[in-house]
Image (cartoon, rainbow, N blue to C red):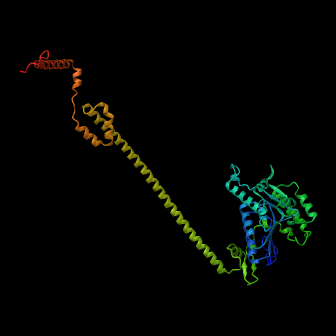
Amino acid sequence: MNTSKFKYVVGEAKENEVCDIRLFCDIDEYTANSFNSEFLWVESYIKPSKIRVLINSSGDSVLYGMSIFSVIRNSSIPTECINEGLAASMGSIVWAAGDKSLMRDYTILMIHNPFDSTEDNKDTEGEPDYVKAFRQQIEMIYMKRWGFNKTKVKELMSGKEGTDGTFFTAEEAVKAGIIPVENVLKTSKQKIEKVKNAIEGITDNHLLKDTITSICGELSSNGSDNKENKHSINDVSNLNKNKQEPTEVENKTKTNNMDTGQTIDFNFGAVVASLGFKEKVEVPQVMARITELVNVENKLNEANQTIDSLKIEKAGEVTKNQNLTKELENVKAELQAYKDAEKKAMSQKIESMVQDAINTGKIEDSAKQNWIDMPTKNFDLAKATLDSIPARDKISTEIENDKDNVEKVKDSVQTVEAQMAKQVEAVVGKDFTFGSLK
């Protein structure tokens, strides 16, 4: 199949043969969507024996780079990712996605921590939560793909003090254990030296990528290093092809299905692949799948509306319960206040009743506390008991306070005693001679 007008596929892709896809650009939304569409098309309709992803990228968007990583990792066809110049930042993540990761002996690998480059967050203190999440995701990929522990990955991503991450030549990547020595693709010493001299002292990722691209393009124009590695940078005019905006021709490329003779629109094929079809399908099947997805979306919207309604209803019930709880607390407070007032009034009533009983001589003052305790337990019984006790005059007190009364009492006592003595004397005699009673 002729895929020469494809943006990323190199040359003509054929069934059961190796297909090269070139990623020679920074990674953004457009790059990721276009690359993924072509990759899925090749995987689903061309069915090559292997897909080789040729990489020369300084990275960029973590979000869209992850989408490319996912597409490559989940490919049903064996994949190789080859570092053709620079695989830096998210470019290194894409490079790590293949079943096998290879480096040309003159290329550079660079890994570092993700960061927020937006103007709005430059002055924000601390690291945003989504940057932390991206960093943990990237750490996990390096750990899984390279077999490193978390501590080593963190050290490599942070780099030495004062540096942004860690750079590796192919030789250094082998020493670090990132790739085995057989995954280094040999080239001529002339190319190695020319690239080495050209990039010496350059630390900016974008400039590194462009310099390596330019040098390799010049050398490639004189022929490939060997037939085995002919998929390296072969066409200087195509090196920056990935930076061009898509043309109408590219968006409407037609390809022939060799088995059926049908003409399939490339965009239609990308849609088919994104819908999950791995085999050749007819339009009715695609429409049926789309209808199914639309129905699912409608049901999901209905479910979300139901959930929103339930949330509102629940919020109303919560508010209602809160109001009832508040009302109950108010009633309890009022009831307690009433009980306290009633208890105070009863205490005053008992105190008054007992004091009246003391004042009327019904009970002694010393027994006051006992009489107060009794009505506290049974008021009606205590009241009935006190009512049944007759009031007494305080004669002794009046006599004690009136001297005339005291003298009168004494005289009365003496008179009675004299009369009794006289009667006794009449009976027994003065000297107890016992006369007869008259």
Left or right placement of residue 87 versus residue 345 in this view: right
Residue nearest the viewer, comparing 310 with 403: 403
Residue that sits furthest to the bottom in the current view: 260
The residue positioned farthest toward the top in the image shown: 431
For this orientation, the residue located farthest to the right is: 190
Residue 426's spot in the image, x, y percent?
10, 18
Residue 146 place in picture, x, y as percent: 79, 62
Percent of width and height locating residue 220: 89, 68
Residue 91 shows in this picture: no
Residues 310 and 400: in front is 400
Name above or below for residue 106 compared with residue 11: above
300 vs 222, left or right, is left
Number of numbered discs overlaid on the protein picture: 0
Kindly indicate the quadrant of the structure image that contains residue 361.
Answer: top left
The reply to whether residue 242 is in sight is: yes
- Residue beneath the point at 90% across and 59% down: 196
